[in-house]
Amino acid sequence: MLDEDLAKVMTAYRTCELATLAKDGTPITWPTSPWLRDDGKFVLTTSLGFPYKAYNIRRDSRVAMLFSDPTGSGLDAPEQIFVTATASCPEEISTAPGDLAEYWSMLFERQPSGRAHLSPLMRPLGDWYYMRLVITITPETVTTRPPLVSRPRTEPAQSIVDSFETAVLGGRTATGEPVLVRVRPEPTGTGYRVTPDVPVEPGPASLLVHSHDELIDNLRLALVRGRLTGDSFVPSRVVNPIGSNWAVLRQGRRNTRDYLRRRGLARPKVDWAAFAALAG
């Protein structure tokens, strides 16, 4: 069981950064909204439209979580909380709240814009959003870190990373587990100088920048993949999942179709009435 005080802080955070390991060992980090169960395990879901976290977890169960952006939490400069953990993600597709009613209620409350997918006009295009793979995360270690004090940039931004004060560096420990640490990237011309306050091994790495408002809306995010050498992060490519709404809908439908086709599955039906009842 998690320490009660730490559990309250983690529950107050609206999002946390979650790192899973890609095929090449790169920690792939995205903001998520986990639900903390009474047994101390975290639950989150990923849609069939964007199932990459599920793929990574099924290949390598080691994950890391960092609670470091307190926007919307109501907390004043809370400590950061870092969690090492293992995760599981069965093949079963969830299309109704069921045992996850508390999780979905939390999402609808914290991110009201998510209710838009329930609109009868959106259902034919966005049903994949409610076709979910369930991820259960079992913490192994929990440590705290002081908040990173705000220090606005003084130079004009040359990239999306430059437009953020801080970023989350995803790397690996000496034994291969993913590790996350919030840093202040300093542009060097060929990449970024980073000074993590915990050990991070040279090798495949990533930088995540993201922000949201108090209702987890107006999202800005991008993930930069690259390599870490000493205190230098050298980018290789930028992954930005947020395009136009129509582009996201098309990609989600395409990915869902491919996921089901590869497994020989019929398209499951969403229990719209159950979700609408929870959303209010």
Image (cartoon, rainbow, N blue to C red):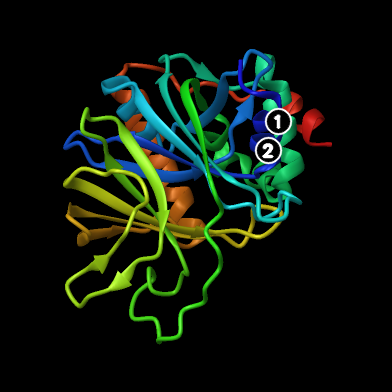
Q: Is residue 263 left or right of residue 9?
A: left
Looking at the picture, which amino acid does disc 1 mark? Asp
With respect to residue 18, does 192 lie above or below?
A: below
Which residue lies under the disc numbered 2? 9
- Residue contact at pointers 1 and 2, CB within 8 angstroms: yes
Whole-percent x, y for residue 122 in the image: 63, 46
Q: Nearer the viewer, mark 1 or mark 2?
A: 1
Secondary-structure class at tag 2: helix
Q: Is residue 143 left or right of residue 275?
A: left
Residue drawn at x 72%, y 55% is 76
Q: CA distance from mark 1 to mark 2?
A: 7 Å
Looking at the picture, which amino acid does disc 2 mark? Val
Which residue lies under the disc numbered 1? 5
Whole-percent x, y for residue 183 in the image: 40, 58
Q: Is residue 99 left or right of residue 249?
A: right
Which quadrant: the N terminus? Answer: top right
Q: Residues within 10 Å of mark 2 (few under 14, many from 20)?
A: some
With respect to residue 261, does 216 lie above or below?
A: below
Whole-percent x, y for residue 142 in the image: 50, 29
* Foreground of the two, 228 or 272: 228
Residue drawn at x 35%, y 45% is 198
Which quadrant: the C terminus? Answer: top right
Q: Residues within 10 Å of mark 1 (few under 14, many from 20)?
A: few
Whole-percent x, y for residue 203 in the image: 15, 45
Secondary-structure class at tag 1: helix
* Foreground of the two, 127 or 279: 279
Residue drawn at x 39%, y 43% is 180
With respect to residue 31, does 218 lie above or below?
A: below
